[in-house]
Amino acid sequence: MTADDLVLGLVLLAPVIAVVLTAVIVLIIDLIITDWVSRRPLMWISCLGVLIAAVLCGALLFGGYAGKTAFAGFLVLDGFALFFEMLFLLAALLVLLSATTFADREELIEAEFYVITLFSTAGLMLMASGNELMTIYLALEVTSMSLAFLAAWNKRDAIAGQGLKATEAGIKFFLLSAMSTAVLLYGMALLYGISGATTLADISKVLTGTPSTAALLSVTMLVAGFGFKIAAAPFQLWTPDVYQGAATPATAYFSVASKAAGFAVILRIFNGALPGISAEWSVLFGVLAFVTMTVGNLVALVQTNIKRLMAYSSIAHVGYMLIGLATARATGSSAVMFYLLAYAFTNLGAFIVITIMANYAPDDEIEGYAGLARRSPVLAMGLTAALLSLAGIPPFVGFFAKLYLFLAAIQSASVGLQLLVIWALIMSAVSLYYYGRVIHVMWMAEAPADVPIRVGFSFSQGLALAASVAGVLVVGILAGPFLNAAVTAATGFGR
Amino acid sequence: MSPQTGALLLQIVLWLPLIGAIVVALLPSDEYRPMRSWRLATLFAAVTFIASALLLIGFDRGAADRFQFETRIPWLPFGSDYRIAVDGLSLPLVVLNALLTLSAVAGSWRINTRQTLYYSLFLVLESAVAGVFTAGDLFLFFLFWELELIPMFLIIGIWGGARRDYAAFKFILFTFGGSAFMLVGILLVAFFGPKPLTFGMTEIARFDFSQYGRGITSLGGIAFILLFIGFAVKVPVFPFHTWLPDAHVEAPTAGSVMLAGVLLKMGGYGLLRLCVSLLPQAAQDWQWLLIVLAVINSIYGAFVALAQTDLKKMIANSSISHMGYVILGIAALTPIGFLGSLLVMVAHGLYSGLLFSMVGLVYDRTHTREIGAMQGLAARMPFIATVFMVAGLASLGLPGLAGFPAEFTTFIGSYNVFPLATILCVCTIAITAGYILWRLGAVFFGPLMEAWAPLGDAIWRERIAVGLLAAATLLIGVAPNVVADMSAAGVAPIAARVTR
């Protein structure tokens, strides 16, 4: 490796390095200065670091670095990687800003939340630009460890008679993610055994024509492993418990960032290394899409806890996005990317309100939201916009995202996919019922007399909510630039 | 009127209500300044109505078969533009929407909870419906179509009657479920339509879908039925009608006025503008279904209305019956039939809005809608009784009122095509006359019941609100050409495509 290559590699990694450095700085400040009244400045330092990383991403994009590879092709910084890096940074920023409610409760270990969020963001960013199986695997492990910690961070909230729900969530997440990673690693090992290579481009050269049994086995294992990560049915069972148990900001981060990373890696590996056998895996994803959206939507109908509701809703949305993967085309890939962006704004918007409401709605039960439209019109409108966007009602961004996705599937001219689109639309109509129930409680039910009338929130939470609601409103109507970015990033993916 | 002024005016008609909605929503609550949000909302609705009336005057009636006052801005990167325009088919409905919103808002002065939210939702609704009628792009059309759902859901759910939760959910789930099919239909016609990919209605209408084969299982046939399901829920067509009695009865008066007056028309308009206009061959293939459903709708609706003992339920079900005439006119696939169905839409918008307003006025005073519980009310409320009778007579097709030219044209248009079906539908007029005259007579005439002796007549606000609609009903009755000539020209290109 020459010095030039090393320098190029470091330049391409600059955003990731910025995030890691910020995390280290926050950690050190937390250790040195122990007599602060509040550790809140650390949150702003973390946000600053995230913003610097985002600026660096922009600089790399416009500085002509897009498309370059480094470290012997292990790392690639194409439009795809930059799109996802920005997406993770956006999610991290909104989650950091909205965490104050929980940070106040976990005062002593507040800094750790920021540090771990930053570390996991760095891992996710590395995942998006990994161009080789081992790099991707390493990044995945970094992320999984940090996410398991995040899930367990909420140490003080215990459910009567059930012990510490956050610890339970953390352990569940850790064990299941370890297991799924093992399955994934087995799939990757098989892939290496067949092709003798770990870089995606080299694997794609070997895997063409009729696939061998080993190749099919490997693809199945990869799908199963990633199925756990993105919570596709039938690998979704951990989701509701972890979502419910973890601190709400951590749940928000799971539901958006780790899911987006899972899709990023799937898109990268399947389109980069396995395009030769796309007919096989696209059927697999199609079946998974059908099962996932059906299970997610139907089980969501009977939830009474908003975090469990959001868990099943996130499963349903994974089902829709899998349709995009099943197209095995560049249009499908770009539609999935735009969907992830829309989903990030929308879901984070919803979770910011849920985070704020954690102090007012006991155990996150939906009844606790009764009369929110009067107790805080801003929060009610924010959550309503987010839920309608999730249900796919215009003019919110979720509608546009669904539309591009379904358009891509219809364009593929495969009857199976077209039927899947009709099913997905029926499922969207079903989803309106459970989102509508929350809206109904907020706008039409009366608040019980004994709850506080006003619902308050901090400045940073208001900022985060405003940003995500703005995204929900604007990204859809002015979709042009975002969609073009996704289309450019996905060129070369699929047939 | 110059095209630029007209285009600007049309944008005002489309967006001013939404701006008004935001302004009204930002007002502090009405606790200390009663009626402030009512005044402001009425002002916005009135300005919008005046702008739409100016459009009606400035519209070039000689060229009503073409889109006028067009605004076109490139929008989304896959062939969808922001395209807003009106032609002879949509302009009457745009004006109807503005008129009914004004009447509904002005008549809502009794609302005493969460007024700012109430009025702003009605103004959002007005913008959304105006968007449906003026969109020249399928994607934009769908966007406005869905935008209308949430305000109506909240209007029924917050200010509705005892079973409002059930009715609101039923309304939104039925419509949203229907529009899911419609969206697939839109994507199909757009994607298999002209290249490069476009959502423009005029471009797609020029495309010949019969190159993909004919018959109900061809691409055109499938796209037609998918679109049809979306509109059939809205019209509503049997068997998708069950949401209507619930929603209409539970909604507050102004909500029922908007539902029956304009929201149902979105369905009929969509059938003409999308189903028949984009897929004329498929419309011929599916003609048998349309005609069967039209007959079922008008007869079934009329008999159910006849059996009601609740005034509002009776009128809600009579809407189903009258919307059967709309389907009948469309099913004939003749220019006269199309014209008739458009006129029925306009006329029904006026008199059903009026009927619901009058039921609301009666209910405000008696707090009952049971027909058996009221008698001789005309003695205490002559104005209400008179206008109620005018609306009722219009709905049974008395010459001189809006219903007559509309229904007459429809039956003329369809008789040559389907004599038997037309005769069956004409028979329902007798049933309509039965329930309207019988029920209204029971409520308003005869000896006054003692319990109702202290009641008063409508006050000036209410008189203006319903007077507007009554005047329009009369105007179209005596001078149908206010809308008929431009409507005839507006539907002519669609008819030409069918017979091509």
Image (cartoon, rainbow, N blue to C red):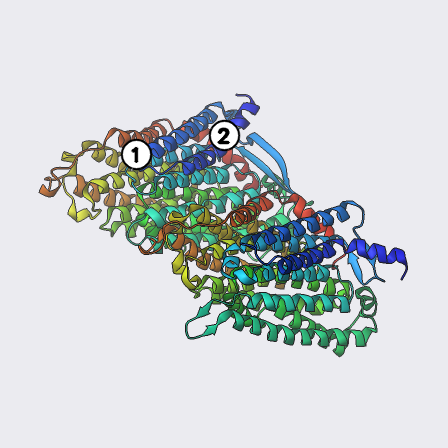
Extreme residue in the right direction? A2
Residue toward you, A403 or A102: A102
CB under 8 Å between discs 2 and 1: no
Q: Label 2 is found on which chain of the structure? A: B
Whether residue B500 sits left or right of residue B362 in the image: it is right
Which one is in front, A197 or A319? A197
The image position of residue B251, as x and y in percent, is 33, 47
Mark 2, other Cα within 10 Å: few <14 / some 14–19 / many ≥20: some
Left-right relation of A393 to A69: left
Real-space CA distance between mark 2 and mark 1, rounded to the nearest whole angstrom: 28 Å
- Which mark, residue A437? none
Q: Amino acid at mark 1?
A: Pro
Can residue A48 be seen in this snapshot? Answer: yes
Q: Which residue is mark 1?
A: B34
Residue on which disc 2 sits: B12
- Are labels 2 and 1 assigned to the same chain? yes
